[in-house]
């Protein structure tokens, strides 16, 4: 294992120290493992979090127009309720807090416990559950569909409405609507290597790929032989469209996301193929992202997320955002 780390036991703390040094727009509580905006806004607050190893999710999306706080757990491990409770009490200004939770068993349970703790402090909490992955219904980590790339879409769009002064119920509802309109699917070329393990999470022969992989390296739908990018892009898109039917004239937000170890040039190859397939159907890509946004440590692979967007969702997507990992309109 070759990694830029000090010891496997201090990766998260050392990374948080680096985030604090790099981004003065954030306040990083290294001891309690909570990242918040350095400047507070009087509005409904958005809090998310999950295991580390998926950067820039979630800490990279703390800032104007997105999250007010993020709670990083150890690598691929849920944060604990005390972290989430601390984040909620720190950022609540009296208008309530929306928890944005990826559908993994530990995250769901711990955010629920944190919501109960917040309620004891008279903090109103709404929860938006993200479960966009169409690869498998149940997996090693979760009951039901996994939460993956659509988490960014929910955080961005709900964050924009919060910035505009939306109330607690409206912000939670738009987050749920974004999740319902979004689907994701991923393919891995290699396994990732968690520092504590010191070896790849699973064995994948040189000529094989994991189709429908999860962001922790969970098994997908099948183990198959490597194929050209146009065929793999078609597989991802067709699987999504089987669950999210789109018609000619529909508009979408599309993210082609790297899983941590894939060169950007390859992501653009895949995105071009996806764009061609959608154009053949008369479906418009109104907005797009290509890059590393929801990663899996050093995994070579990619995920595709498609959101069926209406005028309101596009308007909120275009609203100003200023975070370490996502920035426009400011």
Image (tube, rainbow, N blue to C red):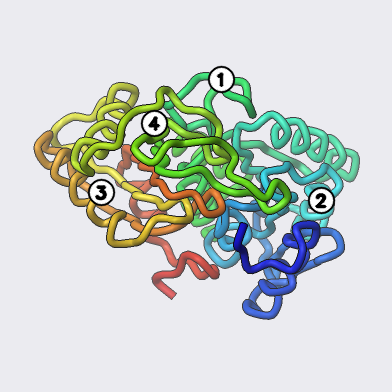
Q: Which residue is mark 2?
A: 83
Circle 3/circle 4 CB separation < 8 Å: no
- Residue that appears at 58% across and 44% down: 200
Q: Which residue is mark 1?
A: 138
Mark 1 or 4, closer to the camera: 4
Circle 2/circle 1 CB separation < 8 Å: no
* Residue ranking furthest to the right: 120
Position of residue 134 relative to residue 1, above or below, is above
As measured in the structure, the alpha-carbon distance from the residue carrying label 3 to the one carrying label 4 is 15 Å
Category of crowding for the residue at label 1, using alpha-carbon neighbours closer than 10 angstroms: few (below 14), some (14–19), many (at least 20): few
Disc on the earlier residue, 2 or 1: 2
Disc on the earlier residue, 2 or 4: 2
Q: Is residue 229 left or right of residue 132?
A: left
Q: Is residue 27 left or right of residue 284?
A: right
As measured in the structure, the alpha-carbon distance from the residue carrying label 2 to the one carrying label 1 is 27 Å
Q: Which residue is mark 3?
A: 270
Quarter the C terminus occupies:
bottom left
Disc on the earlier residue, 1 or 3: 1
Q: Residue 79's x, y, as percent?
A: 76, 46
Q: Nearer the viewer, residue 225 or 248?
A: 225
Camera sees residue 39: no
Q: Quadrant of residue 118?
A: top right
Category of crowding for the residue at label 3, using alpha-carbon neighbours closer than 10 angstroms: few (below 14), some (14–19), many (at least 20): many
Q: Secondary structure at mark 4?
A: strand
Q: Which residue is mark 4?
A: 211
- Residue that appears at 62% across and 57% down: 1
């Amino acid at each position: 294992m070759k990694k830029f780390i000090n010891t496997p036991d201090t990766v998260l703390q050392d990374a948080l120290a680096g985030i604090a040094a790099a981004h003065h727009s954030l306040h990083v509580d290294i001891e309690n493992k909570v990242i918040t905006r350095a400047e507070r806004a009087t509005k409904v607050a958005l809090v998310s979090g999950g295991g580390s190893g998926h950067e820039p999710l979630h800490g990279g999306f703390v800032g104007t127009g997105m999250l007010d706080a993020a709670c990083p757990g150890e690598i691929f491990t849920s944060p604990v309720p005390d972290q989430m409770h601390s984040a909620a009490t720190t950022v609540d200004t009296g208008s309530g807090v929306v928890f944005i939770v990826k559908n993994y068993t530990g995250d769901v349970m711990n955010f629920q416990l944190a919501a109960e703790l917040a309620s004891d402090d008279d903090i109103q909490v709404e929860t938006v559950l993200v479960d966009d992955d169409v690869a498998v219904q149940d997996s090693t980590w979760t009951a039901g569909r996994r939460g993956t790339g659509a988490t960014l879409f929910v955080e961005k769009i709900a964050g924009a409405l919060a910035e505009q002064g939306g109330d607690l119920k409206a912000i939670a509802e738009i987050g749920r609507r974004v999740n319902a309109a979004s689907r994701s699917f991923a393919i891995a070329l290699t396994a990732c290597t968690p520092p504590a393990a010191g070896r790849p999470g699973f064995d994948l022969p040189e000529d094989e790929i994991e189709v429908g992989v999860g962001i922790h390296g969970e098994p997908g739908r099948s183990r198959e032989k490597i194929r050209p990018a146009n065929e793999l892009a078609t597989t991802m898109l067709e699987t999504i469209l089987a669950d999210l039917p789109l018609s000619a004239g529909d508009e979408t937000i599309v993210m082609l996301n790297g899983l941590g170890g894939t060169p950007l040039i390859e992501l653009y190859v895949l995105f071009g193929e996806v764009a061609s397939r959608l154009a053949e159907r008369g479906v418009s890509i109104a907005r797009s992202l290509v890059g590393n946004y929801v990663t899996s440590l050093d995994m070579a692979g990619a995920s595709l997320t498609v959101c069926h967007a209406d005028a309101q969702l596009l308007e909120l997507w275009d609203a100003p955002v200023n975070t370490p990992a996502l920035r426009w309109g400011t």
